[in-house]
Amino acid sequence: MSFAFIFPGQGSQAVGMGKELADAFPAAKAVFDEVDAALGEKLSDLIWGGSIETLTLTANAQPALMAVSLAASRALEAGFGVKISQAAFVAGHSLGEYSALAAAGALSVTDAAKLLRKRGQAMQAAAPAGTGAMAALIGKVDVEVAEIIALEGSAAGTVVVANDNNVGNVVISGTKAGVEAAIAAAKAKGVKAIPLPVSAPFHSPLMAPAAVAMEEALAAATISKPVVPVVANVTARPISEPVDIRRLLVEQVTGRVRWRECVQWMATEGGVTKFVETGAGKQLSGMVKRNAPEAETVALNTPADLEAFAKSFS
């Protein structure tokens, strides 16, 4: 069995996530303690008992989701002896790429937490509230159709394809006027368009100031060679060299998340037959089923999930 660990991005957060893992595994609790120490605040209190509105703020959601993913991967190794290095690849959706890198030893948990807090703050600051927007194109749509819709919307303002999740689920991002025009263009083509409740136009040219901030932050961070290759969002190909990781994390701020291609490459060229979603929720598993229907999926959210997955090795 060739498998890949995959790590979720924003939208998977929920109050209480990771609490069962922290209660059951000291190695998982240690991750939350390390993130709290890195940020100088009890983010774990917010994750387990705060309001969903505060948790969803991007500067909180990003390090929080990473913490849950790393808690699950550390618990899997400490509790059941299953290591990240047994996977063929790791990959993560948007912020999940930082989780993948930390799980594979390229980033420390402390650095990942600090970088994701900075990333969230920089993304929020890049576009004043109310100036940007995102929308999900659902149904009869693929990336080529989405690009036409974005082009039509761009007459009113910047709008680009931000996330190519799977056929039938493509996200656009840009100025409020551009995205609104694109939504109208989509509806005229019979494509369902749903405005997303986000605080900034992620993965668009409007994030350029955030890319500059992240270039500075990443230049100061220690990045090691990961124990397994990381399939990068912006190239949909595996990378291992720290210089490439640093460069592509900067490009990712304004670039497209090519998730459909990442999954399809792993399932074909990469020979992956099972995708193991590690952390919060099951959003990526749903995308995998659409992108690689032959592949198995499993989500590791709870201690019982970890145990069942570990038993599949015996």
Image: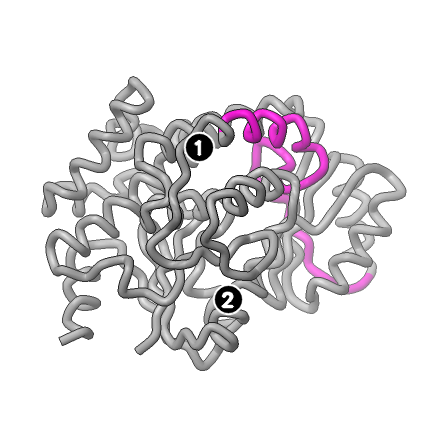
Asked whether disc 1 touches disc 2, contact meaning CB atoms under 8 Å apart, the reply is no
Magenta span of residues: 189-217
- Residue 157 against residue 127 in the figure, above or below: below
Q: What's the mark number on residue 17?
A: none
Q: Residue furthest top?
A: 40
Quarter of the image holding residue 33? top left
Q: Find disc 2 in the rendering and name its residue.
A: 263
Is residue 195 located in the magenta-colored stretch of the structure? yes
What kind of element bears circle 1? Answer: helix
Q: Position of residue 233 (x, y in %)?
A: 55, 53
Q: Amino acid at mark 1?
A: Leu
Q: Is residue 52 visible to the viewer in this orientation of the structure? A: no
Q: CA distance from mark 1 to mark 2?
A: 23 Å
Is residue 197 located in the magenta-colored stretch of the structure? yes
Which residue sits at x=13%, y=52%?
A: 78
Is 207 placed left or right of 262 in the picture? right
Q: Amino acid at mark 2?
A: Val
Which residue sits at x=81%, y=44%?
A: 181
Q: Which quadrant is the N terminus positioned in?
A: bottom left
- Scheme of colours in the image: one colour
Mark 1 or mark 2: whose residue is earlier in sequence: 1
Q: Find disc 1 in the rendering and name its residue.
A: 116
Front residue of this view, candidates 146 and 237 = 237
What kind of element bears circle 2? Answer: helix
Q: Residue furthest bottom?
A: 294
Q: Position of residue 77 (x, y in %)?
A: 17, 55
Q: Position of residue 85 (x, y in %)?
A: 28, 60
